[in-house]
Image: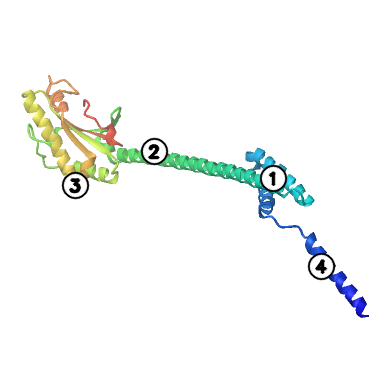
Amino acid sequence: MKFNKRIVLSVAVATILSACNATPERNETLERARTLVPEMEQSPRAGIAAGDIANARTSLDAANRLAESKSRKTDMEFEAANAVLSAQIANEKILTAQANEQVAAGSAQRQTVLLQARERDAQRSATRARSLEAELADMKLQKTERGLVLTLGDVLFDTAQATFRAGADAPLDRLAAALKEQPDRQVLIEGHTDNVGSDQNNMLLSERRAQSVQTGLLQRGVDRSQITAVGKGENFPIASNDSAAGRQSNRRVEMIFTDSAAHVGAGSG
C-alpha cells in the first residue's frame, strides 16, 4: 500500500512539473504587438496607413509562428519588435490625419461663422440706411455715389455769419438723434458759399459754418469720431451765382453719411 502511494505521488509531481514546463514563456514585446496590431487593423482610418499595418501583421504572424515552435527566440523577438514599431508608425499617421481633419473642420466652421457675421453686418447696414432715410426723409436726404447726402440751406445762419439762427435746434436735434442711434455711421460736414466776397473770406466762412454744425452735434451727444468738418468755400457751386436764387442755393451745408470712416473723403460737394 505504501509503495502504491509513492507511485501515485510521483506521478502527480511529474504531471505538475510537465504542465509547468508546457506553459509558454510570456514575452512582453510579443504581447504588446498582439494588442497594437489588431487595434490598428480595426481603426476606421486604417486605410491611411495600410502599408504599415500590413507590415505589422506580417511581422506579428511570423513572431507567433516562432513563439509556437519555441525556437529561435531572438528571431521571434525581432519580428515582434518590428510589428510593434510598424503599428506605432501607423498609429502616428492615423492621429496626424485625424488632427488635420479637425483643423480643417474648425477652419470651415470659422469661415461659416465669419460669413454669417458679414451677412448680419450687411443686413444691419441696410437696416441702418433705411432707418436714416426714414428719420430724415422730409429733410431732402438723397442717395449719391458719395453716400447719403443731406443739404442744409442757409436757413441755419444769418447772412455772412456762422452762428445759428433761432429755430436751428430742431434739425440739429434730429440729426444728432439719428447719429447716436447708429454709432457706426460717419458724417462729413461740408460748408459751401456763393461767390460774393473774397475767396479767402468765403473759405473761412464755409469752414466756420461746417464747424458750427459739428459743434452743435457734439453738444447733443454725438461721438466726435463720427464727425469730420471741412470748408469748401465758393469752389463747388450747385447753381449759377448770377442770380439771387442761385447764390442762395450755393450757400449751404452738406452732410454726407457713410457706414465707415474709410468712405468719408473731402471730395467736391
Closer mark to the observer between disc 4 and disc 3: 4
Q: Give amino acid for label 1.
A: Glu
Q: Looking at the image, is 25 positioned above or below residue 245?
A: below
Mark 1 and mark 3 in contact (Cβ < 8 Å)?
no
Counting from the top left corner in percent of width and height, residue 261 is at 27, 36
First of labels 4, 2 by sequence position:
4
First of labels 2, 3 by sequence position:
2
Residue hosting label 3: 220
In the image as oriented, which residue stretches furthest toward the bottom? 1
First of labels 1, 2 by sequence position:
1
Q: Which mark is residue 122?
A: 2
Closer mark to the observer between disc 2 and disc 3: 2
Q: CA distance from mark 1 to mark 4?
A: 32 Å
The quarter of the displayed image where residue 229 is located: top left
First of labels 4, 3 by sequence position:
4
Residue hosting label 4: 16
Mark 2 and mark 4 in contact (Cβ < 8 Å)?
no
